Amino acid sequence: MTLAVQIDQFGGPEQMKLVDVDVGDPAPGEVRIRHKAIGLNFIDVYHRTGLYPLSLPARLGMEGAGIIEAVGEGVTHLKPGDRAAYASNPPGSYSEVRVMPATCVVRLPDAIDFDTAAAMMLKGLTAQYLLKRTRPVEGLQSGDFVLFHAAAGGVGLIACQWAKALGLQLIGTAGSDEKCALALANGAAHAINYRRENFVQRVRDITQGQGVKVVYDSVGKDTWDGSLDCLRPFGLMVSFGNASGPVPPFAPAILGAKGSLYVTRQTLFTHIATRERTQAMADELFEVVQSGAVKIHIAQRFALRDVAEAHRALESRQTVGSTVLTV
Ligand SMILES: NC(=O)c1ccc[n+]([C@@H]2O[C@H](COP(=O)([O-])OP(=O)(O)OC[C@H]3O[C@@H](n4cnc5c(N)ncnc54)[C@H](OP(=O)(O)O)[C@@H]3O)[C@@H](O)[C@H]2O)c1
């Protein structure tokens, strides 16, 4: 028997209970992994509250790193004893040991420790697909401005550094002056405290009235309208999260009125649907981390049994960078 976090109903952090589970052996196409570190992500909050519904009872957690203990029939890219890491469905990484599909589990380079891996797989692969694979029709050239909300968060700090490495001028928003300073220290070209400043006006000023080619918006409800107003004609609005609540329904005609804009709603799980693409994206992530171009900031650590406290900190905007759950 081994410990895992389970919810029996949707609700607040108090719904998460540590339960004893029997994990068993991997079926064909699966692996059994013993976690050394677990990543905390905002999607775990959406799962816990039921915003992204799961069948109950449900396990939580989408990101982890550890040692492969056993592999099921047909799994050839991993073997027992391998160091490995993943961002993957289904939820279940909040656990000591789990059995899971092997598709999104990759071998971890020796130079990357378990905590770093658990802190970067879901967030780093997200930054990768946003900046490299989710681009406006006119493309992105060196020196172009992009707007990235919640720039001091887990995905945000990785995106600040990666955007700089790509030659982009990332304008980051964040909820305090300290968070803005952190975004700037990590490569953002400009930072806006959107709790105190009008970010639309600031973006207009920074871009000399032109607007940005692309907005990466994970805040959702609170920033949606303003984000559209930051785009230049034919610009791309990339919605990829709902930290402040889901984006309300809108009339497509608004996109025409604001300059023939494009809108997309992206999720990492479409991008990592195949093993080949997951590996290619992970290789790029490993490369930027090993080269030092992107450093992974683990600003908070909680024991797995204190996961409720970790959720409270994330939801109340008290965290910066990545948070790791220790086992
Ligand atoms: N679609 C995808 O593929 C995908 C993948 C990964 C992550 N995401 C999304 O990307 C976002 C970042 O994920 P993360 O795990 O790295 O989290 P995070 O950025 O570390 O935490 C969320 C941040 O959102 C900001 N925020 C703004 N309004 C908020 C509100 N009302 N309540 C709570 N937070 C608010 C806060 O930063 P400030 O205080 O600076 O505003 C907060 O720190 C999340 O929305 C997540 O769902 C999407």
Image (cartoon, rainbow, N blue to C red):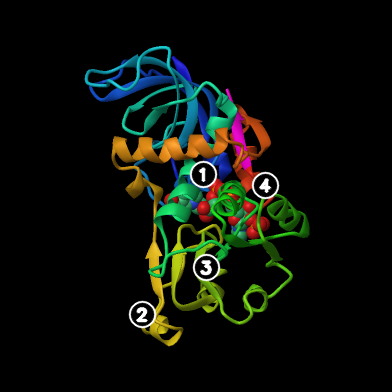
Which quadrant is the C terminus positioned in? top right
Residue depicted at x 69% and y 60%: 175
Please give the residue where the numbered disc 3 appears in the rendered image: 221
Instruction: Specify the amino acid type for callout 4.
Output: Val
The CA distance from mark 1 to mark 2 is 30 Å
Mark 2 / mark 3, whichever is N-terminal:
3
Q: Is residue 195 visible?
A: yes
Mark 4 close to ligand 1, CB under 8 Å: yes
Q: Residues within 10 Å of mark 3 (few under 14, many from 20)?
A: some
Check contact, mark 1 vs mark 3: CB within 8 A: no
Q: Is residue 251 above or below residue 44?
A: below
| Vertical relation: 30 (above or below) 146 | above
Residue that badge 1 annotates: 123
Could you tell me if the residues under marks 4 and 1 are in contact, i.e. CB atoms within 8 Å? no
- For label 1, being within 8 Å of ligand 1 is answered yes
**How many numbered markers are drawn?**
4
- Quadrant for the N terminus, please: top left
Q: Name the spot of residue 87 as percent of width and height, x first.
A: 43, 37
Q: Amino acid at mark 3?
A: Lys
Q: Which label is found at residue 320?
A: 4
Placement of 193 over or under 69, stated as above or below:
below
In terms of sequence position, does the residue under pointer 4 or pointer 1 come before the other?
Answer: 1
In the rendered structure, which segment of residues is drawn in magenta?
322-327
Residue at 75% x, 55% y: name it.
181
Nearest-to-viewer mark from 1 and 3: 1
Q: Report how far apart the C-alphas of labels 4 and 1 lie in the structure.
A: 13 Å
Res 252 label:
2
